[in-house]
Amino acid sequence: MDSWEFYKDKAEEWRWRRTASNGEIVGAATEGYKNRADCMANAECNGYDGDDWDIYKDSADKWRWRRKAGNGEIVGASSEGYANRADCEANAKRHGFGG
């Protein structure tokens, strides 16, 4: 089972990260939030509010995902690259990707 961590960064803004049972970080906030409630809402968002999902290959030829809000801001992203697209999509589904 994944665990969620909510914490303040160096700028005193709230961020989240999601950790798999093996200790690997499988997702993290890409921006800070002034209040914890907004941070939690972002973490728990299932991507149904008009968010767009990108599944792409990075410069190291690894698969990654990112979620963009309707305003174009990146609100979530994979914290690691995957050798195959299926593993990347499985990780994205843990964060609300519908497929």
Image: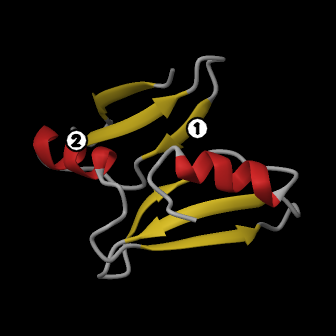
- Residue 34 position, x and y percent, is 14, 49
Which residue lies under the disc numbered 1? 26
- Residue 35 position, x and y percent, is 11, 44
The span from disc 1 to disc 2 (Cα, nearest Å) is: 16 Å
> Which numbered tag is attached to residue 59?
none
Q: For label 2, count other residues whose C-alpha is less than 10 Å away and answer few (under 14), some (14-19) or many (20+).
A: some
Q: Residue furthest bottom?
A: 71
Contact between marks 1 and 2 (CB within 8 A): the answer is no
For this rendering, which residue is in front, 32 or 42?
A: 42
Task: Look at the numbered disc 1 and give the secondary structure of its residue.
Answer: strand
Task: Look at the numbered disc 2 and give the secondary structure of its residue.
Answer: helix
- Horizontal placement of 76 versus 40: left or right? right
Q: Is residue 44 above or below residue 1?
A: below
- Horizontal placement of 92 versus 32: left or right? right
Q: Is residue 12 visible?
A: yes
Q: Which residue is painted at 37% across and 81% down in the image?
A: 72
Q: For label 1, count other residues whose C-alpha is less than 10 Å away and answer few (under 14), some (14-19) or many (20+).
A: some
Which residue lies under the disc numbered 2? 40
Q: Which residue is painted at 66% across and 69% down in the image?
A: 55
- Residue 97 position, x and y percent, is 50, 59
Q: Looking at numbered disc 1 in the image, what kind of residue is underneath it?
A: Val
Q: Looking at numbered disc 2 in the image, what kind of residue is underneath it?
A: Met
